[in-house]
Image (cartoon, rainbow, N blue to C red):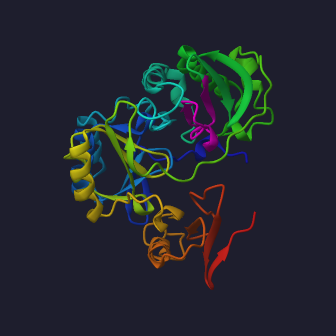
Amino acid sequence: MIRSRDDDACPGALQVHQAADGGLARIRLAGGMITAAQLESLAHAAAEFGSPAMELTSRGNIQVRGIHDADGLAAAVTAAGLLPSATHERVRNIVASPLSGRSGGLGDIRDVVQSLDHGLQNRPDLAELPGRFWFGVDDGRGDISGLAPDASTHLVSPDTAAVLIAGRDTGVRIPAAQAADTLLNLAQAFLAVRGNHWRTSELDDPDALLTEAGLQPTEPSGATWPHVDTPPVGWITQDDGRIALGAAVPLGVLQARTAEFVAAITAPIVVTPWRSLLICDLEEGIADTSLRVLAPLGPIFDEHSPWLSVSACTGSPGCAKSLADVRSDAAAAAESGEPAGRRHFVGCERACGSPPIGEVLVATNSGYQPRHP
């Protein structure tokens, strides 16, 4: 699909989108990482300046809806350290293996995420990237590569990374230490060849980016990874013996009050691309107490919960185009406990947020109908 550059209306913390229920802001988190203090500040800001029902996104970001004071929200986000660059805030789309450095993987890619984020902000030209363009950093387990970011790296050993475009291995291999610079160069190459395209998957010849970025394949190309659609949930023993709690958030809606309880644990937090939370680096006793406190508030710690198999777009009343309150219908489906497989409920034919696997149910004037490819 070819779109006009002027059509890029992706919301940010400063560029607020006007939805049916008020302003919508998106606060971007590099690699989904956020401190407890930042989450607490954002929860307070959401309750004060918009809706306390915050949304976790499929790129590990947080959205605030129903905003009635955009300036107040922006000031609060800035004060919390969640707006490090006013010029680049909409292009800080960086997704990374959320358990990296704590459990599994071939290496710890958290430093790559930080270097990529800082490098991106220090490249004035890259502020022109489309708001939908996103980077991926996979620690070798394949969870991020399966999501097919526009430009990504995938560890194939602790010291070597494959370069991927739109989730496809290009055959290029680089030292893992060069991952951030390589991704920035690929983004620069995309700006040079994109025309009116927003995504690398839309290019007629995505491998042209390699030539533009000065990269040469040395291995067979074409490998892809399966799509991951469920979050890490429950009690996760880290490699250092401490505990991470994986908390699925039903339909990705995180209430400010629940966020405050999460923040009160004062532990590092990661928002995953599967609209869930990881609460990390906990001693066993604190993890046990935290789980007992949080579970009654709504987060899901059971990997077999039916909540993990349903998702939904915003629907009514937040979206003017929606024909149904899809979140309520999705919740009813989850609470029924019926083992019907992966289902995504959407309010119109645009089918926003639809995963590439599972059944997509589209609201119509005569009920839900499955969307056909």
Furthest residue in direction left, as rendered:
264
Q: Residue at x 61, y 56 (%)?
A: 355
Is 302 left or right of 197, judged from the image as shown?
left
Q: Position of residue 157 (x, y in %)?
A: 60, 21
Image spot of residue 203 (x, y percent) = 75, 36
Residue 256 versus residue 184 in the image, above or below: below
The structure residue drawn at horizontal position 49% and vertical position 21%, both measured from the top left corner, is 124
Taking the magenta stretch, the answer to whether it contains residue 53 is: no
Quadrant for the C terminus in the image: bottom right
On screen, residue 196 versus residue 235, left or right, reads right
Percent of width and height locating residue 95: 50, 37
Q: Give the magenta part as a residue range.
A: 133-156
Give the image quarter of residue 271: top left
Q: Residue at x 59, y 47 (%)?
A: 7
Q: Quadrant of residue 350?
A: bottom right
**Residue 75 visible somewhere in the drawing:** no
